[in-house]
Image (spheres, grey):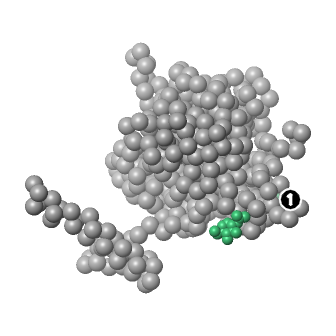
Amino acid sequence: MGSEGGKWLSLPFLIAFIAATLYLLQTLISPRLMLGHEVVKIKRKPDLPLRFGSDGTFKILQVADMHYAKGKMTRCRDVLPSEFEYCSDLNTTRFIRRMIEVEKPDFLVFTGDNIFGPSTADAAESLLGAFGPAIESRLPWAAILGNHDQESTMTREELMSFISLMDYSVSQINPPGIATENIDGYGNYNLQVHGAFGSDLANTSVLDLFFLDSGDRATLNGIRGYGWIKESQLHWLRSIYEVFQQGNKYDQNGLNSIASPTKAAQPHSPALTFFHIPIPEVRQLWFKDIVGQFQEAVACSVVNSGVLQTLSAMGNVKAVFMGHDHNNDFCGELEGIWFCYGGGFGYHAYGKAGWPRRSRVVLVELAKGLRSWMGVERIKTWKRLDDENLSRIDEQVLWDQRLLK
Ligand SMILES: *[C@@H]1O[C@H](CO)[C@@H](O)[C@H](O)[C@H]1NC(C)=O
Ligand SMILES: *[C@@H]1O[C@H](CO)[C@@H](O)[C@H](O)[C@H]1NC(C)=O
Ligand SMILES: *[C@@H]1O[C@H](CO)[C@@H](O)[C@H](O)[C@H]1NC(C)=O
């Protein structure tokens, strides 16, 4: 054992040496290099941290339910008969490119059912096709999983691992510092957006983004239904909330690396949350004023795990962005938090023929101080339709700090 230990000890160093050499070559020479016949490719990383622009805004494009499969081989669903013949996954690709061109977002978020497992025999290839436009845009992007992503050749863990390694992706498998077995699902993470360059808050997080895995399918008392966000995930969120309350990075459990790789977040930075499957309370919005359309039943679990109470107790969550029900594209308010659907984006996903595929934009704006940009002042949203003019509809203010005073 002892003498073998010495030999094995050098292996990690050898690997580290090779990795460092490759990295050096990559940065000095070219992003791709040949080793024998293999192309060694190293992940291209976006500039981090995420931060507000010099115009004091941070714009997020939400892409919900692409249902991407095999590119031009995959037919569209629920389009008009006149549109069917020349319609494939490539129309989904085209729609993302057009949205990026017209909106010039700072960040892209894919809220699940990014690929449609039953229509593909190679999850990796579908992921590359689905996220291709994001990668070619060189914008930072994040993704979470829906209930269909794992229905082909990769498990949910493999999918999140692959997605986290794709170019310009800032997606994470799970929060650093938490063992995989201590949190349910894959794709629970927190990203922080810093203030504008040159401002007093340039090195401080002024906006928090939370991503949660809402699971896939689950059978309860013999009835097949959808997954839900589990207590372990809410526990993680609450542990960050406790961190905020204490105003520093440490909580009683010693989970000191979960909140922030940089400076501690400001206690009351507003937060946005993203997950795929809605929570049961979204059904109540049928009886309330909403912006947008409520055209199909909310397909979620009967289990109420207390997501709304947790988000509401955190105090800083202003809005939640979901997918899953493609024919719903509304925003409605529950306990002071807006719940917004993205509306179906992908052409291989079910939809309504004649009701254009759509995408949501979220614009977060900073307050202007005397000398420089300050913290977040207002959060707005609107949608665009995939029609000839990319029609902009349903603009609304989700939160405005000035209206609270
Ligand atoms: C799909 O894209 C093709 C060309 O790329 C276009 O001619 C066609 O109108 C698009 N179909 C839909 C439904 O957007
Ligand atoms: C932010 O960090 C950079 C680099 O460390 C430093 O030059 C700059 O002065 C800092 N800005 C503020 C407002 O703290
Ligand atoms: C697009 O804009 C043009 C010019 O304003 C208008 O004539 C046309 O009807 C619009 N198309 C759609 C689908 O809204």
Q: Which of the pair 78/229 is nearer the observer? A: 229
Instruction: Indicate the secondary structure of the residue bearing disc 1.
Output: loop
Percent coordinates x, y for residue 306 in the rendering: 58, 25
Give the residue at x 48% y 32%.
232
Rate crowding at label 1 as few (under 14), some (14 to 19) or many (20 or more) other CA atoms within 10 Å.
few
Image-quadrant location for residue 315: top right
The yes-or-no answer for disc 1 within 8 Å of ligand 2 is no
Q: Is residue 142 left or right of residue 70?
A: right
Residue most extreme to the top: 221
- Residue 334 location, x and y as percent? 72, 28
Q: Answer whether residue 385 is visible to the viewer in this image.
A: no
Total numbered labels: 1
Front one among 264 and 17: 264
Q: Quadrant of the C terminus?
A: top right
Is residue 355 or residue 396 the one in the foreground? Answer: 396
The vertical placement of 404 against 67, above or below, is above
Q: Is residue 64 left or right of residue 175?
A: right
Which quadrant holds the N terminus? bottom left
Q: Quadrant of the rendered structure where residue 61 is?
A: bottom right
- In this view, the residue in front, 386 or 189, is 189
User: Picture coordinates of residue 142 (x, y %)?
Assistant: 55, 53
Q: Residue at x 41, y 36 (%)?
A: 182
Pointer 1 residue: 369
Q: Quadrant of ligand 2?
A: bottom right
Q: Is residue 163 above or below residue 216?
A: below
Q: Position of residue 171 (x, y in %)?
A: 51, 53
Q: What amino acid is at disc 1?
A: Gly
Q: Residue at x 58, y 56 (%)?
A: 262
Please tell me which residue is depicted at 86% across the width and 59% down the height of the picture.
369
Can residue 217 be seen in this snapshot?
yes
Which residue is outermost to the bottom?
Answer: 29
